[in-house]
């Protein structure tokens, strides 16, 4: 009986020939990551273990991104704790102005590769499944233990195979595919499972769209999402790393908990209405819902291709007078490139602001927090109650195209509604 | 030793943003976090909850973020245990790691209301509603998870392992 790619990666990391879903195993981790809001707790727990050094400083990464540049004194102190520990350990550390949002930065630096086991003190660590790695989010204590020992315990997940067929319509992107999927199966539809994304539509899908999909696997309750390594993956990796890697494929006779097929040919650009990522509707079915703010950015949709799409729509148009449109590049690299390509000029001319790279408003940190009664269309990944600010504010999830169109029209809108 | 407590009942998909909003993630102090537990779903909860109380909830409790601050806030507020129909995986793991009992008992949840008194025997996987007198089975923990619980959380379990390794391998 064959194994799925997730099972194979975990088996290798556990030093086993094979593993079965449901088994608890101990795996060696290839990369351990934490950020400015989860690091202080991890570091405190690490110190309690009485271990002096992290297991391998080349495999431990610290990224300041959530509340940075420091939004207040307490946030500054958290960043300081992380920075000092990282430097003292000689671990991989990215500083403000030379990095950005963790899940944009790590791939940019070639740190996420096929076959790796990657854990991070952030639930969107599953993003790296786009690179044929097994990547999952954990809490600060698990991360502290892994920093000390270089291993972690895992329950081998079942794999649910998703097969996307048909022809992708215009303006239907990776964000729409994952929103559609979560809308179909629910926010616990893939609970504890690995979501394996496959099919002819996926084979044609650009890397950025795959990254967006893997990023939101957690919103379906999944342990992780994963893609095969193909030419697109190899092309991406060739630009960022010379490290060797071995792609991992699912065996033809691998066992899946479920196989779910979606024909995407009739999909339209989607939104997830408050207050669950599964509350999904076509954007053009949402009539007359005025908005106050638009956020284009985040680890979900803050890459160059996302900004290009938004710029294409905002070019020659104006952000609606009632709307604050905040564009957040996912990294310093994205910001540089967006500047060189003239995208930033387009955003500024349209009346949008162009921010520093940060998670900021995604989790109600800063750089666009919502007041009572306000509503934001956002390219982020969560719209739970109070996520972006006041408990009586609303977040509507969408792709960059829908977000940009909504910014222009001042209400939830599909790009097709623009003249 | 079974634990007993007064119930606070919640619905499905209680996410980590309502358990502890991100605006409070500028501290790791359990007492500070406890003051804001469940704030965005019930601003009064933190002042109403008493040590020994039990949270009972529907499906997918703790969904969303990996923030360990969530179970920390619940535990520091004095909540003895969380009983739910199902748990989000990162929350479940975090709770076990820090020693907050998380019990999966779907049937018990459906027949329990705020104000009830529950008795929970985690070792034998039994939940009893003292108002109705009904007893329910809870999903039992895996041996490995029981090991972490017996050690008193993940850090203790890891410390034990590191100490054993040192003892076996001589001085390191």
Image (cartoon, helix red, strand yellow):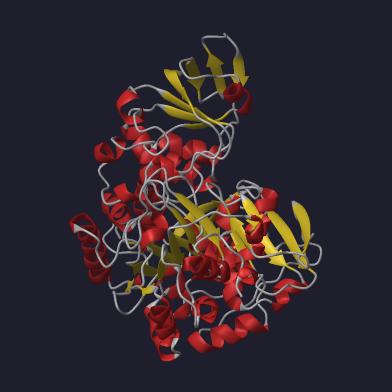
**Toward which corner of the image does residue A269 lie, by quadrant?**
bottom right
Q: Please provide percent x and percent y for residue A371.
A: 35, 50
Q: For the N terminus of chain A, which image quadrant?
A: bottom right
Residue depicted at 30% across the width and 78% down the height: A97
Quarter of the figure with residue B46? top left
| Residue A92 rendering spot, x and y as whole percentages | 34, 73
**Relative to residue A79, is residue A209 depicted above or below?**
below
The answer to whether A385 appears left or right of A81 in the picture is right
Instruction: Give the percent coordinates (x, y) of residue B3.
Output: 43, 19
Q: Is residue A272 above or below residue A232?
A: above
Taking depth in this image into account, of B155 and A242 the one nearest to the observer is: A242
Can residue B1 be seen at all in this image of the molecule? Answer: no
In this view, which residue lies farthest toward the left? A73
In this rendering, is residue B73 above or below A268? Answer: above
Task: Say how many tags the image has.
Answer: 0
Quadrant where the C terminus of chain A is found in the figure? bottom right
The residue located at (77%, 65%) in the rendering is A266
Please determine whether, in this image, residue A13 is positioned above or below residue A356. above
Report the residue at 32% width, 59% height from top.
A366
At x 28%, y 55%, the residue is A40
Residue B41, located in which quarter of the rendered image?
A: top left
């Amino acid at each position: 009986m064959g194994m799925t790619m997730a099972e194979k990666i975990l088996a290798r990391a556990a030093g086993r020939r094979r593993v079965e879903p449901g088994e608890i195993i101990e795996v060696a981790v290839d990369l351990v990551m934490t950020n400015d809001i989860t690091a202080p707790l991890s570091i405190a727990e690490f110190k309690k273990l009485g271990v002096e050094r992290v297991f391998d400083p080349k495999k431990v990464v610290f990224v300041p991104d959530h509340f940075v540049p420091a939004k207040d004194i307490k946030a500054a102190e958290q960043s300081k704790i992380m920075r000092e520990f990282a430097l003292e350990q000689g671990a991989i550390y990215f500083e403000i102005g030379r990095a950005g949002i963790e899940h944009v930065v790590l791939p940019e630096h070639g740190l996420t590769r096929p076959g790796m086991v990657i854990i991070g003190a952030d639930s969107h660590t599953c993003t790296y499944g786009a690179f044929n790695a097994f990547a999952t989010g954990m809490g600060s204590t698990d991360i502290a233990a892994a920093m000390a020992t270089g291993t972690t315990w895992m329950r081998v997940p079942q794999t649910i195979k998703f097969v996307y067929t048909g022809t992708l319509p215009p303006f239907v992107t990776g964000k729409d595919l994952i929103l559609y999927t979560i809308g179909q199966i629910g926010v616990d539809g893939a609970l504890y499972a690995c979501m394996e994304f496959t099919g002819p539509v996926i084979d044609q899908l650009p890397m950025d769209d795959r990254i967006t999909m893997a990023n939101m696997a957690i919103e379906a309750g999944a342990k992780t999402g994963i893609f095969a390594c193909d030419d697109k993956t190899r092309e991406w990796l060739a630009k960022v790393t010379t490290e060797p890697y071995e792609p991992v494929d699912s065996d033809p006779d691998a066992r899946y908990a479920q196989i779910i097929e979606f024909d995407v040919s009739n999909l339209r650009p989607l939104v997830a209405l408050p207050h669950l990522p599964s509350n999904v509707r076509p954007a053009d079915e949402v009539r007359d819902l005025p908005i106050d703010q638009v956020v284009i950015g985040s680890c979900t949709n803050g890459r160059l291709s996302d900004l290009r799409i938004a710029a294409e729509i905002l070019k020659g148009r104006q952000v609606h007078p009632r709307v604050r449109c905040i564009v957040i590049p996912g990294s310093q690299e994205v910001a540089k490139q967006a500047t060189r390509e003239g995208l930033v000029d387009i955003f500024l001319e349209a009346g949008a602001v162009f921010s520093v790279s940060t998670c900021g408003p995604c989790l109600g940190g800063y750089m666009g927090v919502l007041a009572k009664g306000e509503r934001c269309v956002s390219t982020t990944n969560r719209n739970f109650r109070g996520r972006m600010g006041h408990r009586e504010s609303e977040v509507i999830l969408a792709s960059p195209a829908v977000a940009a169109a909504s910014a222009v029209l001042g209400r939830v809108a599909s790009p097709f509604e623009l003249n | 030793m079974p634990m007993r407590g007064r119930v606070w009942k919640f619905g499905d998909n209680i996410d980590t943003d309502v358990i502890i909003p991100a605006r409070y993630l500028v501290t790791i102090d359990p007492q500070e976090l406890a003051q804001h537990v469940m704030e965005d779903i019930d601003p009064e909860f933190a002042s109403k909850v008493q040590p020994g109380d039990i949270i009972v909830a529907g499906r997918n409790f703790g969904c969303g973020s990996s923030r360990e601050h969530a179970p920390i806030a619940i535990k520091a507020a004095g909540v003895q245990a969380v009983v739910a129909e199902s748990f989000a995986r990162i929350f479940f793991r975090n709770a076990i790691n820090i020693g907050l009992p998380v019990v999966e008992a779907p049937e018990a949840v459906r027949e329990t209301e705020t104000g009830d008194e529950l008795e929970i025997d985690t070792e034998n996987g039994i939940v009893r509603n003292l108002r109705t007198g009904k007893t329910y089975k809870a999903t039992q923990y895996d041996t490995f998870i029981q090991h972490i619980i017996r050690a008193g959380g993940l850090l203790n379990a890891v410390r034990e392992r590191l100490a054993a390794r040192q003892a076996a391998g001589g001085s390191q």
